[in-house]
Image (tube, rainbow, N blue to C red):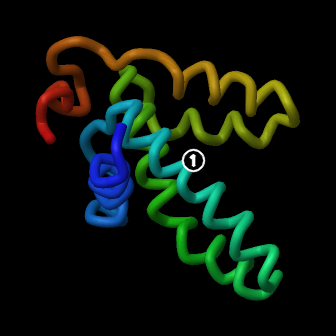
């Protein structure tokens, strides 16, 4: 994956930042998460206030892409609530996030592979 491809995949959740409908590929989800982790670490080393502002700015887009990622594997966005269970919830969500999406259409829309 080159820089332009990373940039392209990172921008997709920002373009759909309030879209909780449809599906999100693993590539879209994980690129967004990993780039945000890197940005958060860099910003937080500069200023904890800026780090907090960045966290606030990415909250809704992160929530939306997480819901769309769960939709891609055929799960409801309500499964995000399992994350409130300490440790077990995080493990379950990571397991869901790494799964390949359902082939073909599901209740949440068409398969997003090949859409970008």
Give residue 94's position: percent from left, percent from top. 64, 27
Splitting the image into 4 quarters, where does residue 91 fall? top right
Residue 96 horizontal side relative to residue 107, left or right: right
Which residue is under mark 1?
Answer: 34
Name the one closer to the observer, 5 or 56. 5
Up/down of 72 relative to 83, above or below: above
Quarter assignment of residue 101: top left
> Height in image: 74 above or below 25?
above
Q: Residue at x 37, y 42 (%)?
A: 28
The secondary structure type at the circle numbered 1 is helix
Characterize the local packing of mark 1: few (<14), some (14-19) or many (20 or more) Cα atoms within 10 angstroms: few
- Please state, as top left, top right, bottom left or bottom right, where the N terminus lies in the image: top left
**Residue 93 can be seen in this image:** yes
Q: Residue at x 68, y 66 (%)?
A: 40
Task: Examine the rendered structure and indicate whether residue 74 appears above or below residue 80.
Answer: above
Going 71% across and 85% down the picture, which residue do you hit? Answer: 50
10 vs 96, nearest the viewer:
10
For residue 19, say whether it is visible.
Answer: no
């Amino acid at each position: 994956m080159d820089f332009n491809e990373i940039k392209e995949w990172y921008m997709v959740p920002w373009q759909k930042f309030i879209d909780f409908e449809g599906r999100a590929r693993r590539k879209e989800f994980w690129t967004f998460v990993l780039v945000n982790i890197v940005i958060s670490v860099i910003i937080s080393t500069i200023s904890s206030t800026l780090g907090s502002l960045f966290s606030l700015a990415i909250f809704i887009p992160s929530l939306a892409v997480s819901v769309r990622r769960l939709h891609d594997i055929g799960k409801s966005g309500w499964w995000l609530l399992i994350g409130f269970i300490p440790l077990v919830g995080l493990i379950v969500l990571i397991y869901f996030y790494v799964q390949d999406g359902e082939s073909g259409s599901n209740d949440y829309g068409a398969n997003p592979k090949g859409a970008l």
